Image (cartoon, rainbow, N blue to C red):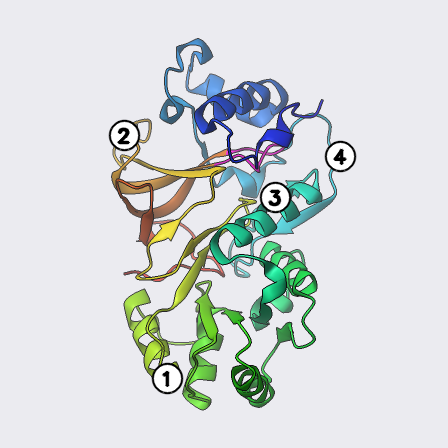
Amino acid sequence: MLFPFVNKIFQNNTDFDSLARELFNYQYGENKIYKKWCDHLHFDIRRIDSTPQIPFLPISFFKTNKLLCGDDSYDLIFESSGTTQTIKSRHYIKDIDLYIQSFTKGFEIFYGDIKSWCIIGLLPSYLQQENSSLIKMVDELIKLSNHSQSGFYLDEYKKLHHVLKELEHQQQKTILIGVTYALLDFAEQFPMHLSSTIIMETGGMKGRRKELTRDEVHAILKKQFHIEQIHSEYGMTELLSQAYAKANGKYYCPPWMKVFVRDEDDPLLVKTKGKGALNIIDLANAYSCAFIATDDVGEIFDDGSFTVAGRLDGSDIRGCSLMVV
């Protein structure tokens, strides 16, 4: 059985709360693992009066369970980068077109027509692993941009520097999306003035460099590239949607994604604003689990935007590890 309202997810006039409750009812009935979790909490589905009352599944379940609605068929698997000492999360994707719709429509909301951009990926550690959702996203954006100089780079910093100088000369709008340590390496070796290029970091040191706060990283990149703001992308293997920060590490979600905070001492107490551990509803996760209690901590503001301060004590340090503010 497929979720019958999946075509509503990306419509601008969709009532998020109503669709979230419809999706909960669907996943409670079709996702065996999620149903077991809700039943373990002795949760009465009839008492949902508001979206924050929906049970959120601990993100660690993606490491040990096959989270799928309906039968066991799927298009592909996304895996977290992790380390050799950690168990990787596995996200089984029943409909890859749903993911493509999510990140393309999300990109257009924040940055406009993809065809007006040159997309460059500086993601060496992700290129060297299989089943990365981030690589899938950037690869599709590169193809959709249809720009002759869009593409991935490993450690070809000299070549990348030459390409960016050429794009700057052409005043071509460009997004350089990179893992943090690679952006820092490139910035130190090839500082330059950028005016048509957006630098977008995805987090991630992977033990390659001394850990820095996000503010310290952004300060270095701003100085080396002579730009006023560094953009950030917030996503993870267990999600099919992304939030973006265009300034000061303050993220905004697309309309089909919302972030909540839960009390660290009472994880069933979920609020729409304030500080705490982050819970996420991602409606694009229609065929896995849309209601996820993450290991990230942060703050949600009145307008629904949020910041990320780090990770809960005791949670795994992942390949796309967040920098503590």
* Residue 73: mark in rendering: 4
Asked whether the viewer can see residue 64, the reply is: yes
Extent of the magenta region: 282-290
Q: Residue 137, how many percent across, how many down?
A: 61, 56
Cα separation between marks 4 and 2: 36 Å
**Amino acid at circle 1:** Gln
Q: Residue 6, how many percent across, how many down?
A: 63, 30
Is 286 magenta? The answer is: yes
Q: Label 3, secondary structure: give it.
A: strand
Q: Is residue 254 left or right of residue 5?
A: left
Q: Local crowd at mark 2 within 10 Å, few (<14), some, or many (≥20)?
A: few
**Amino acid at circle 4:** Ser
Q: Which of the marked residues, 1 or 4, is nearer the chain's N terminus?
A: 4
Asked whether the viewer can see residue 312, the reply is: no
Characterize the magenta stretch by its predominant secondary structure: loop
Task: Name the quarter where the C terminus is drawn.
Answer: bottom left
Q: In this figure, which residue is indicated by the disc labeled 3?
A: 91
**Amino acid at circle 2:** Asp
Is 59 magenta? The answer is: no
Q: In this figure, which residue is indicated by the disc labeled 2?
A: 266
